[in-house]
Image (cartoon, helix red, strand yellow):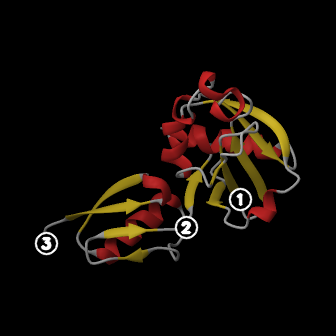
Amino acid sequence: MKETRSFIVKFAYETELKIEAHDEDEAVEIFSDLFLEEINIFDIYNDGALECEEVILFDKNESIIKFERISNLNLINGTSYQGNLNISYDKLCNIFGEPIIIHEDGHKIDCEWAILINNKVVATIYNYKNGINYYGEHGTPAVDITDWHIGGFSHEAAELINKIILESNI
């Protein structure tokens, strides 16, 4: 009987899932079965790690929520407040990676994440008027902030960000 090996599926932003399989092909098949879709965005590396550039999560209705970081910051121009989050900086980083924008301009925001959800919904997560940029030495350092704003072009941005966070189990 062939021995099983451990394979780690590394999603973007340090989220991992361990799979036991006999070989790389079986690992991909198991992962595909778990998430009810064929894997085609993953590369298998010699060290047994599967990596992807976007994260795939499922909500309770089994609909797929895909998200990725936005590198073209022109896409977030014109977004506005859509809701709030109460979550630690570390948890946001575990789910979405490090903030894509660090503001050091002395204005209202210290850091911000820019996210594209399901290839259509633009969302931002940012602190507002509670950090060092706004309050100086009396402001809260970004790593200690737990009160965040969600921005977007519609309330759907806030709904989907909340779903992603709930489904991440972090």
Classify mark 3: residues with Cα within 10 Å, few (<14), some (14-19) or many (20+). Answer: few
- Numbered circles on residues, count: 3
Q: Which amino acid does label 1 sit on?
A: Leu
Specify the farthest residue to the left: 1
Going by the image, does 161 lie left or right of 142?
right
Type of amino acid under label 3:
Lys
Mark 3 vs 2, N-terminal side: 3
Residue 27, by quadrant, is bottom left
Circle 2 packing at 10 Å, graded few (<14), some (14-19), many (20+), is few
Disc 3 to disc 2: CB gap under 8 Å: no
User: Where does label 2 land, which residue?
Assistant: 37
Q: Work out whether mark 1 precedes mark 2 in sequence or the reverse, and give the earlier one.
A: 2
Categorize mark 1 by other alpha carbons within 10 Å: few (<14), some (14-19), many (20+): some
Q: Is residue 2 left or right of residue 78?
A: left
- Residue at the location (84% across, 57% down)? 77
Eyeballing the image, is 131 above or below 3?
above
